[in-house]
Amino acid sequence: MAGEIERKLRRVPGDVGAALALLTRLPAPFADHERGARAAWAWPVAGLAVALIVGAVAAGGRWLGLADGVSAVLALAAGAVVTGGLHEDGLSDTLDGFGAGGSAERRLGVMKDSRIGAHGALALLLSVLLRWSCLVVALEAGLLWPAVLVAGVASRAAMTVVAWALPHARPDGLSRMTGRPTSDMALAAGLVALIVALLASPARVILVALVVAVAVVVLARGAKRRLGGQTGDVLGATQQVGEMAALIAMTIWP
């Protein structure tokens, strides 16, 4: 038993590195790229790293005397740079696919098109505006750090859960290459997010969990019905929807 625990602990740095390498552009020389979906429990840890950068930029902007709106814009830009816009791209592609007619195969084909459609553009615009508005409220209410930390981990935990709950929609792509997490990985990701949320904002944990769960379930059901399952783009959209939901829950009644 002790040996098994020690073996799992030795894998933690490699799993965290694999999560950082997959979901961000941050350097991760210690990443164990062979872990694939077995490192999915650490996706919330990658979200925590992104949240720390986003929060630092927003807090730094306010410390420099910038308007809260400007600080929020810079924070969102920093988050997009750190992730390479991976999740935003997934959101736009997924909504373009949802908006297309025809079979699941046709919708998946639309999602592979590098051009952005009206549905994807509108989804991106709404995502940026909503997250910007929530960050401004969080800055004004003194809730910046709880909001960004909880949103960062909750949205990545949601990705792990959706990757576990839904089958692959296509035989190739990033999600298929990474693999499908087990229920243990999904549970571990949820526990990581729960621990961070309890430390950051214990009073809002239940509210955040409910709001994020409802939003992500709606998205996941849409993906299953329209696409037949999940793809890397769907997981990116899950992150964006989860982040928006968490930020709303964290800034309502500030």
Image (cartoon, rainbow, N blue to C red):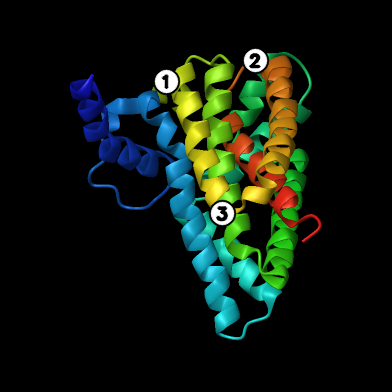
Q: Earlier in the sequence, mark 3 or mark 1?
A: 1
Asked if the residue at tag 1 contacts the one at tag 3, i.e. Cβ–Cβ closer than 8 Å, the answer is no
Q: Which mark is residue 179?
A: 1
Question: In the image, what residue type sits under mark 1?
Answer: Gly
- The kind of secondary structure element at disc 3 is helix
The answer to whether 186 appears left or right of 65 in the picture is: left
* Disc 3: CA contacts within 10 A as few (<14), some (14-19) or many (>=20): some
The answer to whether 24 appears left or right of 67 in the picture is: left
Q: CA distance from mark 3 to mark 1?
A: 31 Å
Using the image as rendered, state which of residue 105 and residue 183 is in the foreground.
183
Residue bearing mark 3: 200
Is residue 173 visible in this depiction of the protein? Answer: no
Q: Considering the image in quadrants, where does the N terminus appear?
A: top left
Point out residue 165 in the picture as x, y percentages from the top left corner: 58, 18
Using the image as rendered, state which of residue 121 and residue 59 is in the foreground.
59
* Disc 1: CA contacts within 10 A as few (<14), some (14-19) or many (>=20): some
The residue positioned farthest toward the right in the image shown: 253
- The kind of secondary structure element at disc 2 is helix
Question: In the image, what residue type sits under mark 2?
Answer: Glu
The answer to whether 74 appears left or right of 209 in the picture is: left
Q: Is 90 above or below relative to 7?
A: below
Question: In the image, what residue type sits under mark 3?
Answer: Ala
Residue bearing mark 2: 105
Which is more foreground, mark 3 or mark 2? Answer: 3
What residue is rendered at 72% in x and 72% in y?
140
Q: Earlier in the sequence, mark 1 or mark 2?
A: 2
Using the image as rendered, state which of residue 43 and residue 172 is in the foreground.
43
